[in-house]
Amino acid sequence: MAFIFSKENRKVVKRQISGFWYEFKRKKIGVVGLAILLFFVGMAVFASVLTPYDPINKERLAQDLAMPELMRIFPQYANYPTTRNMAPSWATEKGVEFVQSSGKRITLQYTTTALVTTDVEFRYKFSYQEIPPNTFYTGFRYQASNVKNLQYTISYSLITPENKSWLLWTRADIKVDWSETVSIDSKEPFLVTRLLGEPQINLANAIFAQKGDYILKVLMRFKPQSTDARVDVTAGDSTFTILGMVHGVLGTDDVGADLWSQLVYGSQISLVIGLTAAAVGVSIGTIVGVVAGYAGGAVDEILMRLVDILLVLPFLPLLLTLVFLYGKNIMYIVLFIAIFGWQGLARMVRSQILSLRETAFVECARAAGGSKFYIMRKHLIPNVFPIVFPTLVLSIPSAILFEASLSFLGFGDPRVPTWGKMLQYAFGFGAFTRLAWWWILPPGLAITGLCLGFVFMGHSFDEILNPRLRRRR
């Protein structure tokens, strides 16, 4: 161990690395490939900084198939709205004595000694100046307690700039303690039918047809049934969301999820799959090729017949069986790519070892008493390195493409964001028919770019490490 890390050895290694880097810098295509690779590595490492959204679970960030915000530079899309998330701060007219507090939460203590119906309104005003949206949703929570000799009604309305009131929700004539979380969606068929008569009409378009000031109104109506009626009411924790027609860097998919986050986190999976599958496959192929070529005889025959068997085994039926028995898992894809990706390298390494084992330096090592393991480790593997290393680099894009193809066919893990799964969902949920290029092109270009980066680097490494491929100066 001391010999391996001696000062002289460190100098040799440093000189070899410097020489390799000098040669590599002269390969323009290799430098381009390295730049591409560093771009995707940076994307994978800083994924949590580049996007704040969860690539799997964060939905309804905007409407389905919302375009990228960059599209607003074009005049026809300039007035397309982004998503607006509002937390209404309620206000009411002064002089209502039983209003204890107002703001984001409404708190009332109503008592009376007269049989008089009393109304109280809380309002939240906001401005909307873009084209009509396609979707909005809203909700709030209320709780009534200590109800005594009283009926009360709560309603929730939206008033347009033309002073038209749309009754979104109401709960009438409640006589007991009650609590409820209210959720209202403009796509709900029952709501649309009640307000417009037909469920096919877009309610959000109808309500936000004009630009101007809109008002959310909560109306509470108290009807005492005796002179000692009372109720305590708490309402609020409200939200009002207008889903945007443009969103983020790359827009949204069919459920309003952020596509940029899926692309960024997909780079992590592609790099891990490519590097892991290629490293395992190349390691197996190198070991099998070296052992078969140097040992010869029965060992060579057994290992080569194993290679032949694996070459003719049907890949997809085996993967289908594994998925059916154990479910979809990204590790199955890595495992299958590694198992079925080393046979060609094993044959190449074996053919190289067959010629190397008869060379003089191997004969000298054998005559000096070197064991088979020592000769393979110290003399044979370093001499097949010019074949193995470029093959390793060139195997990574094959693994990435293979994973993307399997995910596109439906074999991918639904819990993991991958570029292949993005393309599968785009194909299955109408991105191609609706020409949603922001969902189709980015994962395709990312797969192509990352694979080209490794291919450029692999060919440059092959030219540097393989003397027969070096260009004459």
Image: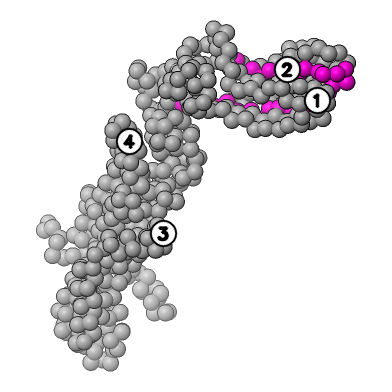
Type of the residue with mark 2:
Arg
Q: Does the magenta stretch include residue 230?
A: yes
Marks 2/1: CA–CA distance = 12 Å
- The answer to which of 233 and 97 lies nearer the viewer is 233
Residue 231: mark in rendering:
1
Instruction: Identify the residue position indicated by label 4 in the image.
Output: 430
Instruction: Answer with mark 2 or mark 3, whichever residue precedes in sequence.
Output: 2
- Using a 10 Å C-alpha cutoff, classify the residue at mark 1 as few (fewer than 14 neighbours), some (14 to 19) or many (20 or more): many
Q: What residue type is labelled 3?
A: Gly
**Residue with the mark numbered 2:** 221
Total marks shown come to: 4
Q: Are circles 4 and 2 on residues that touch, CB within 8 Å? A: no
Cα separation, mark 2 vs mark 3, equals 55 Å
Q: Is residue 355 left or right of residue 122?
A: left
Marks 3/4: CA–CA distance: 26 Å
Residue occupying the point 18% across, 65% down: 466
Residue 213, placed above or below residue 233: above
Mark nearest the camera among 4 and 1 is: 1
Q: Which badge, 3 or 4, is on the more N-terminal residue?
A: 3
**How many neighbours does mark 3 have within 10 angstroms: few (below 14), some (14-19), or many (20 or more)?**
few
Write the residue at 36% across / 25% down. Answer: 71
User: Residue 238 occupies which quadrant of the picture?
Assistant: top right
Q: From mark 4 to mark 1, how far is it between C-alphas?
A: 52 Å
Q: What stretch is highlighted in magenta?
A: 215-244
Which residue is disc 3 drawn over? 327
State the residue at coordinates (23%, 76%): 306
